[in-house]
Image (tube, rainbow, N blue to C red):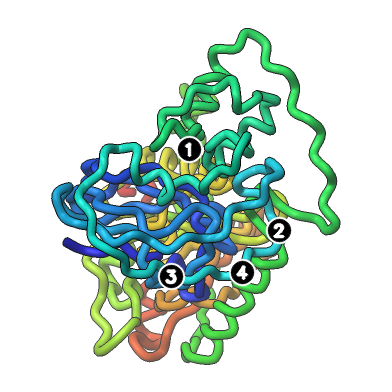
Amino acid sequence: MSIFTMPSLGADMEEGKLIEWLVKPGDRVSKGDIVAVVETQKGAIEIEIFETGEIGALLAQPGQTLPVGAPLARLGAADVAEPTPSPSPSPSPSPSPALAPGPLPARPAGPAGGTAKPPPAPREPAAASVAPASAGVVLASPAARGRAAELGIALETVSGSGPGGAVLLADVERQAQAMPAPPPAPEPVPPAAPKGKPGLDMAEMRRAIAAAMSRAKREIPHYYLSHETDLQPAQDWLTARNADRSPDRRLLMGALLIRATVKAVARVPELNGRFEAGPFGPAAAVHCGLAIAMRGGGLIAPAILNAETLDVDAIMAAMRDLVARTRAGRLRNSEITQGTITVSSLGESGVDALFGVIYPPQVALVGFGTPRVRPMVHDGTVKPRLAVTVTLAADHRVSDGRRGALFLAEIDRLLQEPESL
């Protein structure tokens, strides 16, 4: 038997709000399964479980705000007696989107021990996954209520498949698909202050970014290097490679920049890893963080996991997928918490260079400025060439300027030979 707790989803996270359970007691789960949705300053994050077993009891209710490390669920055999979790305040009775931005509720008390009882039928754990309903109110999860409100669906018309007949988000979506012409959702009330996507409070995100960057500059002895790299060979290779491809299959320069960074780490492995406790050791895999600007403002840097195993086409596909899911609020906790090095690219924003701040507990950040045509000496003559300024912010506790210079030189060499990527 083990306890599944509120995970830490970043160096700046202190607590999270449980939005929805995607499992119920008695369900079998495997390592990597998504079991819950938690809201943080980064938005709604899909939480994976890292053990295989059976859900014994849900110890927290949707709507609760809990500190990192607080018990969320118990994993164990179905015949193990379970304590009764203490009640938690019910969410507001007025329907609102499950991920609606706004002030976090007061932190309720953690689960208390109770009298052991035999395993109930699947209907019994309803109180652990859906807030109790008062007389005349349909039993439903907060996510289901919010989605039903958006679609204009009356909860009384939806058949619930959850514990005790509770209406879940999947039930509402199933009902919406069956309706030939769903009525339009009511116009949302404009918020008092500008917000991003539902569940993403820009003020909170800015606070989280400031806390993480303050910690980084306070605790990490940064050093910086920059290097101008000729991108013309890479651009010519991309043009030829994309000539017969449809727009959705074309490669972008960003995929080559990430691939070059990931391959260069093999030569200077001390730039890839996490400085958390004890002596630093390079990470075995390269989980390359990608800094993604949110359309409403703010920045999130989820990781492309095991990027060293991906070729350029696979990295391009991973980038498209990661950007789409980040802006839709569908990231997984492993993508938020397992990054080992981060790449930040300014794209077409028109700025030549980016000097970044390392995201703790990582030890390096690579920045790419805007590629632009510049006069460069090539084959003994000055010619217009596409070039980019590459920068490195690195942790002096685990590397030094000479090693950082080797790293930037390796990125340069790889970009001169794009066919080798």
**Mark 2 vs 3: CB contact within 8 A:** no
The residue where tag 4 is placed is 106
Spatial CA distance of label 4 from label 3 is 12 Å
**Mark 4 vs 3: CB contact within 8 A:** no
Q: Secondary structure at mark 2?
A: loop
| Residue 92 drawn at (x, y percent) | 67, 51
| Residue 1 drawn at (x, y percent) | 16, 61
Q: Secondary structure at mark 4?
A: loop
Say which mark, if any, is on residue 259: none
The residue where tag 3 is placed is 110
The residue where tag 1 is placed is 251
- CA neighbours of label 1 inside 10 A, class few (<14), some (14 to 19), many (20+): some
Spatial CA distance of label 1 from label 4 is 47 Å
Mark earlier in primary sequence (2, 3): 2
Say which mark, if any, is on residue 102: 2
Identified by mark 1, the residue type is Leu
Camera-near label (4 vs 2) is: 4
- CA neighbours of label 3 inside 10 A, class few (<14), some (14 to 19), many (20+): some
Identified by mark 3, the residue type is Gly
Spatial CA distance of label 1 from label 2 is 39 Å
Q: Quadrant of residue 333?
A: bottom left
Identified by mark 4, the residue type is Ala
In the foreground, 156 or 212: 156
Spatial CA distance of label 2 from label 3 is 22 Å
Spatial CA distance of label 4 from label 2 is 12 Å
Residue sitting at x 59%, y 43%: 134
Residue sitting at x 44%, y 31%: 165
Residue sitting at x 51%, y 43%: 325
Residue sitting at x 46%, y 57%: 302
